Amino acid sequence: MTKAKTTITDQPVTATGTETWQPRILVFACNWCSYAGADTAGVGRMEHEPHFRMIRVMCSGRIQPAFVLKAFEKGADGVLVSGCHFGDCHYIFGNERAVEQFDKTMNMVKLLGIEPGRLRLEWISAAEGIRFAEIINEFTEQVRQLGPSPLSSKRLDDLRIEEEIDG
Amino acid sequence: MMDAGRHPLIEVITNAEVTGMSGGPGDFRVQVRKHPRYVDEEKCVACGQCVEACHIVQGNEFDYNLKARKAIYRPFPQSVPAAYVIDMDHCKKCWRCVKVCEPEAIDFDMPARDYEFEVGSIIIAAGFQEFDASALGNYGYARFPNVITSLELERMLNASGVTKGHIVRPSDQQTPRSILFIQCVGARGEGGRPYCSRFCCMNAVKDSLLIRQHDPEVEDITILYTDLRAFGKGFDDFVRRSFDEQSAHYLRGRPSKIEEEPGSQNLTVFVEDTLEHQLKRVPADLVVLSLAAAPSDGAQALAAMLEVGTDQYGFIARRDPAVSAVETARDGIYVCGSAAGPQVIPDCVAQASAAAARAQMFLTGSRSADEKQEVEPLDLSGSPRVGVLVCHCGINISGVLDIDDLTASAAQIDGVVVAAEHQFACSSVGQDKLIELVKEHRLNRVVVAACTPRTHEPVFQETLSGIGFNPYLLEMVNIRDQCSWVHATQPQEAQQKARTLIRMGVARAKNLKPLMEGKSPMTRAALVIGGGIAGIQAATDLAWQGFPVVLVEKTGELGGRLRAPNLKYLYPTMQPAEKVLKQKLMRLKDSGARVLLNSEVEDITGYVGNFEATLSGAVDEKIQIGAVILATGADLYDPAGEFGYGRLTGVITSEELEQRLCHKPAAVQVNGAPPRSAAIILCVGSRDEECFSGCSRYCCPTGIKQAILLSEQGSDVTVFYRDIRTVSIGAEEMYRKARGLGVLFVRIPDGRKPEVLGTEKVTGVRCYDALLDRTLEVEADLLVLGVGMRPLEPETSKFHDILKASLGLDGFFLERHPELAPVETSVEGVLIAGTVQGPKDIVDTVAQASAAAAKATVFLAHDQVRLNPTVAVVDAEKCRGCGCCAEICQFQAPKLVDDGSGVFIAEINASLCKGCGTCASWCPSGAISAQHFTDRQVHAMIDAFFETEAAR
Amino acid sequence: MAELAAIAQDTRAWACYDCGKCTATCPLVRAGARYSPRRHVLATNQGKRPANSGEGTLFDCLTCKLCDTRCPVGVEYTELVLKLRELAHRDGVEVECPHGGALQSAMRIMAKGEMAQDRLGWLEADMLTEPDEGELFLWTGCTMYYDAFFPEFEMDSIAGTKAAVRLLNKLGIAPVVSPDERCCGHDLLWNGDVKHFEMLARHNVKLVEASGADTLVVPCAECLRTFKRDYGPFFSGKKPRMLHLTEFLSENLDKLPMTNGASQRVTYQDPCRLGRHLGVYDAPRAVLNAVPGLELAEMRHHGSASTCCAGGTWSNCDRYSKQIQVNRLREARQTMAPVMVTACPKCQVHFKCAMQDPNLKDEITIELRDVAEIIAASLE
C-alpha cells in the first residue's frame, strides 16, 4: 500500500470548476426492495443525480425519527425514506410501521420549521430501477429548489459561539 | 431466482434440454444436453464490457423485440446465472468481445455438454407459452400495429422494461388516450381452447390500475369481459378497488372485429354491450389482447420422453385432475405450475411446494447432512483495526472512479490500518489478497468497497469465515451498482460519493460487533391439526418421508367434508368422493402417521423446532413437535332467513343437496317426488360486503355439477349466477355440458338479489336478467343455495389465540406472502393447509396440503435450527416492559414475561425473530437493539456523511 | 484533577463521610437498580472520574434531588452529577438516549436556529397574545413537540398551555407568546451538552429581554428551573421576575372567578424541578384548593418527599424508572382520586408512557391534567 502522494483532504471535489451548490441528501433504504431497486438502476446503467448517500437497513420499519432528525441536525438538505410497496414487505407490515414513524418525524420536522419538502417517503420495489432513478432525480431537484438547509450552513456560527464561550 | 441459484444443493443448468430418461421412481437416469453459451459461467463476472464492445444489434426476445440487445447479452437484468450468452445465429465472431473480456470467459469453441443424472424424482415445471394471437384474424394482431398482447403490455409496464413503465402506441410512440382490453383471447372456446386461462382477468384489472398510476394522460380504459374471474383470495377486493378508483370501464361482451382507421391508425372495436343490449363501436388508441395460455411447444416431446402423456389440450396430463394437481401418470414424476394448465402465481407456488413434497418421498435416505467445518475463531478484540479493500471490478468501477484516490483517502481515515485495491476482489485471487491483508495487518474489521452486498456479501463472508474471521465484522460499500454504474457521466461527483460511502462504511465497521450463529434443537416430528382431506394429505406426505406425525381429529372419523354423507361426486370427473377418500385413507394408514380421533389440541407452546402440544380426548398427553400444520378447514355460510331458507320447504343449501344425493343416490326428491324444476342461486354468502367480500371459489363448479345431476334426472334447472367462475381443470367444459343439457343460466345484476316465490313451499324464483333486459320468473320445486365458505369457529379464533398466527381481514388465516409464501404463516414453523387459509376446492386444497408438508420438511430435515444472529436483542436492565415490541412484531418473537420484579420484561426469541429491527425503532428506552443495524452503527454513518462533506 | 477538586468544593462533596444515606434514599436503588450516589461522591473526592459504562453510571441518575434533601452534611449530589456529566460529554462519552436521541436532535436543531419554527399552530381565535412585546411573557415550553412526538400516548399536553393563556387573559393580560421561543436547553444541559445549552440560553434570554417583559410566567417546571438557576450568566440587564404559573395565579386568586364547582377529588404530583429544585410546594396546592368543591388528596409521598416522574432529562429510561412510575401511579390510585394533576408536562409524558403497560395498565391508569387545565375549567 502506497500512501497517497497528493494530499487528500475531506474537502469536496471541486474539479468541475463550477462552484454551484449541490444538495446533500441522505437516503434510507430497506434491504429487500428499495436498496435492491437502486441496484437494479445500476444494472440497467440508469444515470441519476449523484448527490445522495444511502444507508441500508433490513426493513423500512427500522427507520426511526432519531435517524432522520439526526441527519437534519447534521446538515442534511434532504432525507428520503424508502421501503417496499404495501403488501410486499418482507416482514409483512414493517413498512406500515415505517409510515407511523415517518408521520411522527414529519410532525417534528414541520414544528421545527424545516421545509416538509426536504423529507419524503417513497415505496420502490426491487424491480423498479427506473422508478428509483426518477425519484432520486425528482427529489434532488426538489431539494435543490429549496436551497441549502439552514442547518447546513450553521457550522461557522457554531464556531463563533464556541469562541464567544471560550473567550 | 437468486436463492435457487445460490443454494448449495441446487445445481442450475441453463440453456439445456432433457434428451432421454430411463429407470423408475427412486432411480431415474436422465440425460441432459447443455447447449453452449460460449461464455464460461465460472469466469464471467457480468461486468458488461463485452456488451459494450459488441456491435450487432438484435431484438430482445424477453422484451418481445420491443427492446434491442446485442449478440452477446443477458436475457434480462436479473437472469441467473449472472453470465452472458452469445447468440451464434447472429454473432459474426469479430472477436471484439473476446478482446475486452478481462477474465477471458469467452470461448467460441465451447462444445455442447451431455450429462447424465441419477435422480429419485423428477418435477416438470416447464411452464406455458402464450397463444398465438395472429391465429385469430379478426382481432387484427400483427396486422394493426396498435393491437398488442397482454405480455407486450407487461414489458412496457415494467419499470425497468422497454418504455420505463409508460405505455406507448407502437405506431407512433405516443401515449394512447384510450386503451381497450379484450379478455379471453384464445380461451373459453376460442381458437380451439375450451379452458379458461385463470390469470387474465386479474392481470387486466391490475394493468388498469398500474396504467392509471404511471400515465395520467390515459383517459379511458375499457375492459371487455364475459365473466370477471376474480376467484382467488383477495381478488374480489382488488377488483373492487378498481371499481372504486374507476381505473377501468368494464363492458360485458366479446368483440367481433377491430377496424383500423387509415392514417391515424386508431382502432374501432365492434362489441355488443350485453348488459345494455346494443352494439357499440368503441374507439381505442391501443388494444390489448389478454392472451390465453397454451402448452409449450416442447411439452408433447417432453411428456413422451418422460412417459407421462399430455391431456386433450396438450398440457402435461395429471393422473387425477379432481384430486391432485401435481401427480402425473407415473410415480416419481410430478408436475407443477402452468405446465399442467394455466395457473395464477399463488397456486403455482403452492403446487411447486406440493410437487417437492411428493418428490421427497423417493429421496428419503439421501438427505445431505448439515456439515460445516468449524474453524478456530481469530482473536479480533481490541480497538478497531480496519482494512479497506477497493475493487476495480475490471473497468466497471475503475472506468469511472479513481481507485488510487479512493485507497489513499481511505488510508487516512482514523482506525484504518491498511487500504488496498484489487482488480476483481471477488475472484479467488482477490479473496486470497483479502486473507493476506487480514493476517498481515491483524485486521479486526474489513471494509470491501465493490459491488452490492445483496449479491456479494455472502461471498466475502464465506471467505472470512474460512479463516475464523467473524463474518459480521465485514462491511461492504457499494461503489459499483450504486455509484460508478449510475453516475458515469459525472465522475467527479461519483468520486466524492464513493469517498464518502467508504467513510460511512468504515464508520459503521468500527461499530460492528462480532456475532455468533446460534443453534437450537429441532424436534423432527410434526403435528397436523384437522383430519379432513388437507390434514390427511399433509400427514401422509410427512409420514411417508419417515417423520413422526400426529394427526389430531376432533370427530370420530377422518375425511371432513369429503366423507359421506357430505359429498357425493367430485367435479369434473364425477368420481365418487367416497372412493377418493378411501384411497387417501389407505395411503395414510400405510404411511405410519399416528391418528388420534375424538381428540383436540388444547394448547401449543414453544416455537419452531420446539413446540409442545397438549392433547386431550382419546389421549391425555403432551407431545413435542418441530412444526405444526393447521388444517382445520372452513365452515359453510348459514343462509338462515335468506331466500326463504328455513321458511319455505324445498329451499336447501348446496351441501344439503349433496347429503341427499348421498342418501338417495337414485334421485333427489322433494316431498316424495323428483323435482320437476329446480333453481340454484350462487354466491350466497360470498362476494357480499356484509358477510364475506371474497369469492368462495368452489361454488360455481359445484353448482354446475349439481345442475347437471339434477338435469340428468329430469329436472328443468336454472342457475342464477353473478359471474361464472369455472376456472378449475375441466370446469369450463362442465359449464358447456350443462348448457348443452338445457340448464338455463341467469345473470344476477350487480347489487340485486333474486326473489324467491312461494308461501309455504318454494314455487319459483324471480330475477331481472340484465342480459335479456327482462324480469324472468322460473318455476322451482327445489331451490339450492350455493353457500360460500367462512372461517370455522371457534377453531379459527382458538388457534389464532394459541399460535398467534395472524388472521386476514376476511377472518381466515393469513399467509405470510400471497405469492412467495402461500402456506406459511407469520409464525415460523406454523403452516396452513386447505380452506383454513381461504376458500378453495379439493384439488387446490390437496396441493396446498402437500405444500405445507414440504415447507414442514424444510425444518424437519435438520436436527438443529440455525439461528441468524442479526436479530433483535433486549438489554434486560433497560427494558420497561411496555410491550410495544410484542404488540408490533408480526412474528411473535418478543414476549413479555413476569420476572417478579413488578415490571414485566421483554424476551425476544431468536428462533422467531426475523431481524427486521422494527421493534428496535419502537422501543422507547433503547433496550432493544437490532444486531448488525444498531442505532450506534446508523448514527456513525450519518455523522461520517456530514463530517466528510461539509456544507458547500 | 484540579477540576474535580473544584467540583468537590462547589458541591460540598468534600463533606461526605460515606454514610450511604443517599444510596438508601435513592428511588432508583429502591426500585432495584444497582446504583450508588455515594460512590460517585467518593470517586470525585479521590480525584477519579466515575465510570461511564457498566452499572450505575452518571447518566442513570434521575437528578430528582431527593438524596440532597436527606444528606446529613448537605452534599449537593444533583449539582455534582450535572458537573460530572459536563465533563463526560466534553470527553466524548455518548449517552444512549431514549427514542434513539430523536428529542436531543430536535433540541440541537433548535439550538442551531435559523429556521422559523411553526410552533404556534395551537393558538385559538379567542386567545389574546402578543408576538413580540408586552409586560408579561408566557414561556410556553415544548408541549406542542411532545404531543407531536407521542401520538401513541394520545398526548394532549398543549391543553395545559392553552389553559395558561386563557387564565392570563381572564386576568386581563395578553401575554407575550413568542414564535421564536426555543427549547430551554434543560435536557441538553443535564445530558452534559453545555455548548448547545448555551446557544439556546443566549437566544432565549435575548428573546425575553427584547420583549420588555418584567414578569416571566412559566407553566413548565423544567423551564422555570433552567431560567432561574441556569440562565443567570446570560442576562445582561435587570432580570424579569420569574415564576411558575401556579405562583402567579396564587397571587391573583381574588381576580379569578372560580365559580364552577369541580366537586372532584384530585391528587397532585410535585414535579422535582418545581418542588425540591425550586422549593415551590404551596402555590399549586393553594390554587387547587381555591377551586370550589375540589378536594386535594395527597399521595403517601408528597411535598419534599415526593417521588419524581423518573424521566426528567431524557437520558435515564429503564426498567427501574418504570418501576418508580408504576409505584407512583399506584400511590395516586390509592388516593381514590380519578385525576392526577401535575405542574410539568414532562411528568405527563412519562406517566402516560408507563400507563401503556399492557399488563399493569388497569392498575395504574389515571387521568392526567395540568394544573392550569383544572383551574381554567373552573371558570364558568
Image (tube, coloured by chain):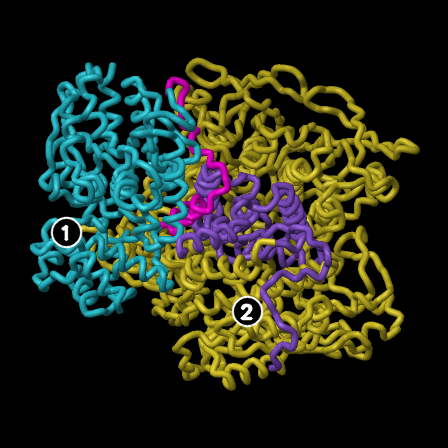
For residue C190, above or below residue B284: below
For residue B474, above or below residue B185: below
Residue B728's quadrant in the figure? top right
- Closer to the observer: label 2 or label 1? 1
Q: Work out which quarter of the rendered image holds the N terminus of chain B and state it.
A: bottom right
Which residue lies under the disc numbered 2?
B457
Q: Amino acid at mark 2?
A: Glu
Looking at the image, which is closer to me, A123 or B630?
Answer: A123
Q: Which residues are magenta?
A: C99-127
Q: Residues within 10 Å of mark 1 (few under 14, many from 20)?
A: many
For residue B567, above or below residue B430: above
Chain letter, colour cyan in render: C
Residue C298's quadrant in the figure? top left
Subunit of label 2: B
Q: Colour of chain A?
A: purple
Residue shown at 42% from the left, 78% from the top: B380
